[in-house]
Image (cartoon, rainbow, N blue to C red):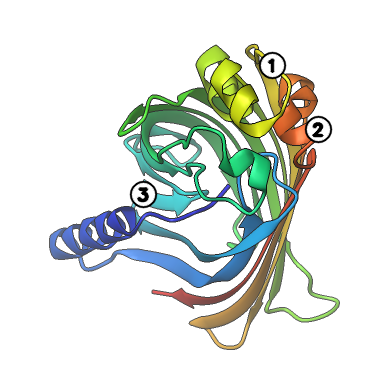
Amino acid sequence: MLRILFGLIVLVTGSCAAFGQANNKIQGYVSIGAGLLPDYEGASKYVPVPYLDGEANLGNYFLRFEGGALELNLLDSDNFHAGPIVGYRMGRGAVYDSQIARMHHIRYSITDGAFIEYEHRAKDPRSGERITLSFADGNINYQSGLNATLRALIHRPVEFIDPGLIAAIEADTSWGDKNYMQTYFGVDSLDSIASGLPLFRARSGMESAGVAFSLDQYLSRKWSIGLRLHYARLLNDSQASPVTRIAGSPDQLFGALVIGYVF
């Protein structure tokens, strides 16, 4: 779920610059582009959004911006990574659906949390796997609850088509606590009166399961063009909520076209 806060982009840029001053051997990549994202969690309509992902490495330490969150690895290890996360969680306000728009508005949240990760790096940098568990608590600007996400990623070159074509497949699942689920999928008495939707009290539980696919075609050693796709199916109370079941859809899609640069 990606709606990028410009302050985080500035933070990524500033942190990378600090790394560069300390060591000229900083390496990494950045991908920017544009995509389509559901108007809100559980929506059936889509809105255009900017897209950004990237990573800056200094040895085994790295800053990674992915999924609307900035991750800082603090472990000097080839395979194990862990550290803090700061991210952005989208709100819900003047959306396209008239019933949801009449409900109380949810401000965006700044999240903080942590992640732990295992990564296998092949000798060929085009190949690798990683599994990541992250926790993010929305507690700045708006109390939006705790969300945990487990992701598994594998990437490989598609050499039978082109040595410069890299494909990646990811599977993920997310869990939300009571506060998170009620914030985005609950309907209280005032919301029910305003929107006409039935009352609904959302409980903690698994929120979604999804799969992502990406392609990057390198045009040179530095530049590439790419595609990002993600499909998630809402589960349990996030699926049963009137916000999803009546006004929206449990099928959540994201897609983006990007331009990449390796530095």
Q: Tell me the residue that label 2 is attached to.
A: 245
Q: Nearer the viewer, residue 247 or 138?
A: 247
Sequence-wise, the earlier of marks 1 and 2 is: 1
Residue, disc 3: 62
Disc 1 and disc 2: Cα gap in Å? 11 Å
Q: How crowded is mark 1: few (under 14 residues within 10 Å), some or many (20 or more)?
A: some
Compare marks 1 and 3 and give the one earlier in the sequence: 3
Q: Can residue 20 be seen in this view?
A: yes
**Mark 1 touches mark 3? (CB < 8 Å):** no
> Image quarter for residue 58?
bottom left
Residue at horizontal 78 percent and vertical 28 percent from the top: 239
For numbered disc 3, what is the local secondary structure? strand
What distance separates the C-alpha of mark 1 from that of mark 3?
42 Å
Q: Quadrant of residue 220?
A: bottom right
| Tag 3: amino acid | Phe
Q: Which of marks 3 and 2 is in front?
A: 2
Q: Nearer the viewer, residue 93 or 119?
A: 93
User: CB under 8 Å between callouts 3 and 2?
Assistant: no
